[in-house]
Image (cartoon, helix red, strand yellow):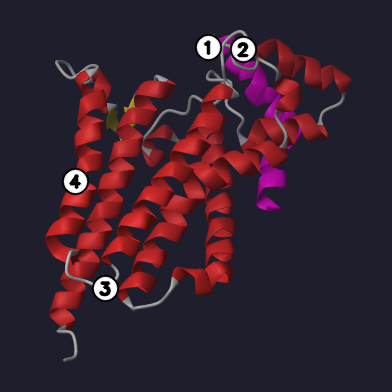
C-alpha cells in the first residue's frame, strides 16, 4: 500500500526534530567547553542561575531523545537500522571535529604556526558540515528507500556547502553584529583556528605575523582590538567576499 502523505510528513518532521535534539545537545556542551556567554540572544544554558554544570547532564538527556524518538516511530521501518547508524556516525564525526578544534586551542600549547586553511577545513568538515548539511538530506534519502552508499557525490557537495557555511560563521564571529547574530563572538579570545586567522597568517608579512602571535588568544579587549585592526588592514572582508 502507498504510504499516507500525512504519515510521511509526520515521520519527516520527527527526523527533523531528532536533528534539532542533536544540534541542541552539541550546542549546550560546546558553550560550556568554549566558556561562551550568549547563544541565540540569551545567556548560554550553563550560565543560567541554578543550572551551571547541570547543563552537562541536560546535554546528555537531549542526546538521548534521539534513539527514543527513532524507536517509537521508526522501529518497524526497513531503514530503521540505517537511521541509527547514520545518527551514530554523524555524532562521532562531529565529536571528532570538536576534539581537533579543542586540542588545537590547548592552553600552554599556543602555536599559531599550525593554523592553516587545511586544518581549518578539516575541523569544520567534521565539526559542522556532516551534522548540519549532510544529515538532513541523508535522512530524506533513507526515508525514500535509497542506499546512502550510492550517493557519495551528494555527501561531497553538502560537506562543501557546510564548509562554506562555517567560513561565514567564522567571519560573523568577528564582524557580525551581536544583536543580529544572537551571540558574542569569542574566537579571537579562545585562540580558535578560525578561517580569519588562518587566512590572515597566509596574507601577513613578518611584522603582521608578530602582531598576531603577540595578541591572538588573549582575552584582554585591547589585544582583541589589535587583532581585528590587523584583519581590517589585511582586508579580510574582501578576501571573504571572494570565497
Dot 2 lies on which element? Answer: helix
Query: Which of disc 2 and disc 4 is earlier in sequence?
Result: 4
Marks 2, 3: nearer the viewer: 3
Q: Which residue is mark 2?
A: 223
Spatial CA distance of label 2 from label 3 is: 56 Å
Membership of 198 in magenta stretch: no
Residue 40 at least partly seen: no
Which residue corresponds to the image point at 19% horizontal and 46% vertical from the top-left?
A: 65
Q: Which residue is mark 3?
A: 78
Q: Which residue is mark 4?
A: 65
**234 horizontally vs 131: left or right:** right
Residue 219 numbered tag:
1
Query: Which of disc 3 and disc 2 is earlier in sequence?
Result: 3
Spatial CA distance of label 1 from label 2 is: 7 Å
Magenta residue span? 221-243
Dot 3 lies on which element? Answer: loop
Marks 4, 1: nearer the viewer: 4
**46 horizontally vs 207: left or right:** left
Membership of 227 in magenta stretch: yes
Dot 1 lies on which element? Answer: loop
From the viewer's perspective, is residue 51 above or below residue 161?
Answer: above
Residue 74 at least partly seen: yes
**Would you identify the image quadrant in which residue 80 lies?**
bottom left
Spatial CA distance of label 4 from label 3 is: 21 Å
Spatial CA distance of label 4 from label 2 is: 42 Å
From the viewer's perspective, is residue 26 above or below residue 133?
Answer: above
Amino acid at each position: 500500500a502507498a504510504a499516507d502523505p500525512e504519515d510521511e510528513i509526520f515521520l519527516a518532521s520527527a527526523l527533523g526534530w531528532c536533528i534539532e535534539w542533536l544540534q541542541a545537545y552539541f550546542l549546550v556542551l560546546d558553550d560550556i567547553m568554549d566558556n561562551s556567554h550568549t547563544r541565540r540572544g540569551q545567556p548560554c544554558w550553563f550560565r543560567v542561575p541554578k543550572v551551571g554544570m547541570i547543563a552537562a547532564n541536560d546535554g546528555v538527556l537531549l542526546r538521548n531523545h534521539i534513539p527514543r524518538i527513532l524507536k517509537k516511530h521508526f522501529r518497524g521501518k526497513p531503514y530503521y537500522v540505517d537511521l541509527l547508524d547514520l545518527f551514530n556516525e554523524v555524532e562521532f564525526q562531529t565529536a571528532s571535529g570538536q576534539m581537533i578544534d579543542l586540542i588545537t586551542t590547548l592552553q600552554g600549547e599556543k602555536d599559531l604556526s599550525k593554523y592553516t586553511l587545511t586544518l581549518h577545513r578539516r575541523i569544520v568538515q567534521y565539526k559542522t558540515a556532516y551534522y548540519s548539511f549532510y544529515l538532513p538530506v541523508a535522512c530524506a534519502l533513507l526515508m525514500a528507500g535509497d542506499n546512502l552508499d550510492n550517493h557519495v557525490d551528494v555527501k561531497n557537495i553538502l560537506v562543501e556547502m557546510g564548509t562554506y557555511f562555517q567560513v561565514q560563521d567564522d567571519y560573523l564571529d568577528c564582524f557580525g553584529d551581536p544583536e543580529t547574530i544572537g551571540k558574542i563572538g569569542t574566537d579571537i579570545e579562545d585562540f580558535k583556528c578560525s578561517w580569519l586567522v588562518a587566512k590572515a597568517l597566509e596574507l601577513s608579512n613578518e611584522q603582521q605575523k608578530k602582531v598576531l602571535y603577540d595578541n591572538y588568544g588573549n582575552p584582554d579587549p585591547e589585544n582583541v582590538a589589535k587583532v581585528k585592526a590587523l584583519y581590517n588592514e589585511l582586508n579580510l572582508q574582501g578576501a571573504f567576499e571572494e570565497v
